[in-house]
Amino acid sequence: MESTPMPEPLRRAVHQLVAEAVSNCQDVLTYTEPFVAHDWKRMTLYRSTDAADTMNMAAMLIAAHCQRTGMSTNTLEGYLQVTQQELRSAAPSEEDRAYAAGLAGEALSYEEMRAPANRDRHHKGQVEAEEALRPEYDPMKLFTEACLHGLRARLSEDIDSLDSYLPPQVAAMARKVAEALEVPELATTS
């Protein structure tokens, strides 16, 4: 493996794109909360696709650099995992609809159940629906959510908003994150 570091201008551009994507991911979480029920469908789709597109821009920027500096097409396609590409323009797949049906507690038709992938995704949705009835227990999920909300609260300087819509344990962690991110004022020299 090559040990040459990423060029600084490319590194900064990638960092900017990742920060933008993370901000969009935080918006997705915000629009899942009850206080924005009127807008959740539109905004969660907008922001999740914005995040995906932004991360795609980061990947394509890195790929363009790699191609420009001599990486073979086969290697580049392997790193880009091109066989995993799914187009949103194709709309939700049968498996996606089976997963949504499982989450909603709906049955699949006999015809839909014949496809193993549909059965698997439907079952996964059913399991996740059952888990959603219990309080969230995964500390990494809670911490990630708290970090995203705390960062947004710090950037908007509206830390008190954390208490208005988050579950109490997430709000408490998000407040700690936001407070830890407080930037001290620089001392002035006279």
Image (cartoon, rainbow, N blue to C red):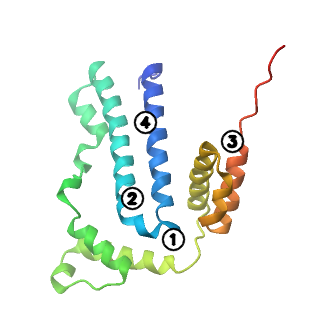
N-terminal-most mark, 3 or 4: 4
Answer yes or no: do the residues labelled 1 and 4 have beta carbons within 8 Å? no
Task: State the separation of the CA atoms marked 3 and 4.
Answer: 20 Å
- Marks 1 and 4 sit apart, C-alpha to C-alpha, by 29 Å
Q: Amino acid at mark 4?
A: Leu
Q: Is residue 6 above or below residue 179?
A: above
Q: Nearer the viewer, mark 1 or mark 4?
A: 1
x and y percentages locating residue 138 in the rendered image = 58, 65
Up-down: is 104 above or below 148? below
Q: Amino acid at mark 2?
A: Met
Residue bearing mark 1: 34
110 over 128 or under it: above or below: below
Q: Looking at the image, which residue is at 58% across and 71% down?
A: 136
- Residue 44, quarter of picture: bottom left
Q: Which of 119 and 42 lies nearest the eye of the viewer?
A: 42
Q: Which mark is residue 181?
A: 3
Q: Position of residue 16 (x, y in %)?
A: 47, 33
What x and y, as percent, mark residue 177?
A: 68, 49
Cα distance in 3D space between marks 3 and 2: 27 Å
- The residues tagged by marks 1 and 2 sit, at their Cα atoms, a distance apart of 13 Å
Residues at marks 1 and 3, CA–CA distance in whole angstroms? 27 Å
Q: Residue furthest top?
A: 190
Question: Which residue lies most toward the left here?
Answer: 111
Residue, disc 4:
17
Helix, strand, or loop for circle 3?
Answer: loop
Q: Amino acid at mark 1?
A: Pro
Q: Residue at x 56, y 60 (%)?
A: 141
Q: Nearer the viewer, mark 1 or mark 3?
A: 1
In primary-sequence order, the first of circles 4 and 2 is 4
How packed mark 2 is, by other alpha carbons closer than 10 Å (few <14, some 14-19, many 20 or more), is: some
Instruction: Tell whether label 2 touches label 1 (CB within 8 Å).
Output: no
Whether residue 150 sits left or right of residue 41 in the image: it is right
